[in-house]
Amino acid sequence: MKFWTVDSFTNEIFKGNPAAVCVLDQFLDDDLMQKIAAEVNLSETAFIVPKQNSHYDIRWFTPITEINLCGHGTLAAAHILWTEEAVPVASDTIYFDSPYNGVLMAQKNGDTMGDSITLNFPAFQAEPMSMPDGLMDALGVAPVCISKAQDDWIIELHNTQQVRDLQPDIAKLSQLNCGDIIVTADGEEGEEYDFVSRVFAPQVGINEDPVTGSAHCKLAPYWAERLGKNEFTAYQASKRGGVLKLKYDHERVFLTGQAVTVFRGKFLKI
């Protein structure tokens, strides 16, 4: 079985968020796909199965569990479908049928960002919440406010430097009853980005995710309400880092980024 690894939300290798992509004739047993994801050991492995008319079934696995939405894995999958002769796609739009969030679209662009891809994903609203026990101790800083979007927590800090400098206690974060912990702050005057973020997800085996498309499905509506605009340039300030162009439109978020193939591989016993 062939697979590719792709760095997403970047045009340089060793930056952005790496994902593996496996193109299958049909999905393997869940246990086998989980073992493959653990063996590859990237934050996500995307499994895709061709259908008809540029439609593909898609599922995503971290090294320890299946997840219900993954932006960088979907971007990586679309990139492979358009760039590898082994899986040709003539259409400028690919439709990914996901088990939990319906149809996700990927649009190929030729624009000022080069050969970028725009993902059409669902938007998720956030609601204010009270300070959870143990959160401030785990973060080591006092938040401006805390909100909840689905199972994820959005932690707003005072400025972007706090986000960049944050050194949370991962062991303590892993004990909190939540999904992803999304830490964010709005950009200050003169900064290149409208907001920055970092994402910690030890509950699904990812201490810090380099660039998280699904988190921006929550951050785009969050910052649209606060900043009074619906288009953003966002930066995820992980060690690898990544840039996303965002547009929030009613119940959808459009995420635009680039991707680069890093290498091809083959599982010999599958």
Image: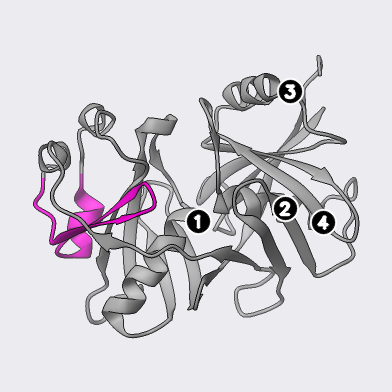
Instruction: Determine which of the numbered discs, if any, sits on residue 213 in the image.
Output: 1
Mark 3 or mark 2: whose residue is earlier in sequence: 3
Label 2: how many Cα within 10 Å (few below 14, some 14–19, many 20+): some
Q: Is residue 13 visible?
A: yes
Q: Is residue 240 left or right of residue 253?
A: left
Foreground residue, 33 or 158?
33
Q: List x then y, in percent, for residue 13.
A: 58, 48
Instruction: Determine which of the numbered discs, if any, sits on residue 97 in the image.
Output: 2
Mark 3 or mark 1: whose residue is earlier in sequence: 3
Q: List x then y, in percent, for residue 74.
A: 64, 52
Nearer to us of marks 3 and 1 is: 3
Task: Determine the CA span between mark 3 and mark 1.
Answer: 26 Å
Q: Which segment did they paint magenta?
A: 141-166
Question: What amino acid is at disc 4?
Answer: His
Residue beneath label 4, please? 55
The residue drawn where x is 10% and y is 37% is 137
Q: List x then y, in percent, for residue 56.
A: 79, 51
